[in-house]
Amino acid sequence: MKDLRAKDIMNTDVMSVRDNMTVRELSAFLTEKEILGAPVVDAEGEIVGVVSCTDIVQSSTEEASIVVDRATPGFYEHGWEDKINLDEIEGLHIENESLPVSEIMTPTIYTVPEETPISEIAKTMVAGRIHRLFVTRGSEPVGIITTLDMLKVFFN
């Protein structure tokens, strides 16, 4: 495991989103692809940022009012399905769904060369508090590593 490098664990199938895509389209894309985030590219295909589910939630809650939590706390609580009020659920929606991705993305891009040891990748992810970074060959992005990819290393 000590000898593993970025190129050994990266995913080369990088799914990106356009910077002019709306938050609604982004939400549909992330849901369809079953991913939590993606690089953002401009019209020329250059990576200009990263966007995640967290960015969607933050953009939606910036203008939202505080909601009183009436739930009883508890992990692994079963039977919650019967407690759902459908009228309340109908009111849930993304406030800024027509906002472009470029308005909510994180413009900071973390990259590592493909020969970077996984110990350095882990340090970078922890220090930057990030869940995905790009692997480069020269200046060209060739893959992505997510926290899930790192977990797979430790449990395989």
Image: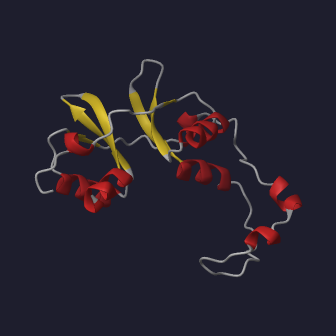
Left/right placement of residue 88 relative to residue 125 reads right
Residue beneath the point at 73% across and 47% down: 95
Q: Nearer the viewer, residue 106 or 52?
A: 52
Determine which quarter of the picture holds residue 73.
Answer: bottom right
Q: Is residue 54 above or below residue 10?
A: below
Determine which quarter of the picture holds residue 45.
Answer: top left
Q: Nearer the viewer, residue 13 or 55?
A: 13
Residue beneath the point at 23% across and 52% down: 121
Determine which quarter of the picture holds residue 23.
Answer: top right
Q: How is the image coloured?
A: secondary structure
Query: Percent position (x, y) of residue 87?
Result: 89, 59
Q: Is residue 52 above or below residue 16?
A: below
Query: Percent position (x, y) of residue 68?
Result: 76, 73
Quarter of the picture holding the N terminus: bottom left
Query: Percent position (x, y) of residue 15?
Result: 45, 33
Residue beneath the point at 74% across and 74% down: 79
Query: Percent position (x, y) of residue 21?
Result: 59, 29
Left/right placement of residue 5 relative to residue 134 reads left
Quarter of the picture holding the C terminus: bottom left
Q: Is residue 53 above or below residue 49?
A: below
Residue beneath the point at 23% across and 28% down: 139
Q: How many marks?
A: 0
Furthest toward the right, the residue is 87
Left/right placement of residue 139 relative to residue 14 reads left
Q: Nearer the viewer, residue 40 or 71?
A: 71
Furthest toward the left, the residue is 3
Left/right placement of residue 42 relative to residue 7 reads right
Furthest toward the top, the residue is 44
Q: Is residue 64 above or below residue 21?
A: below
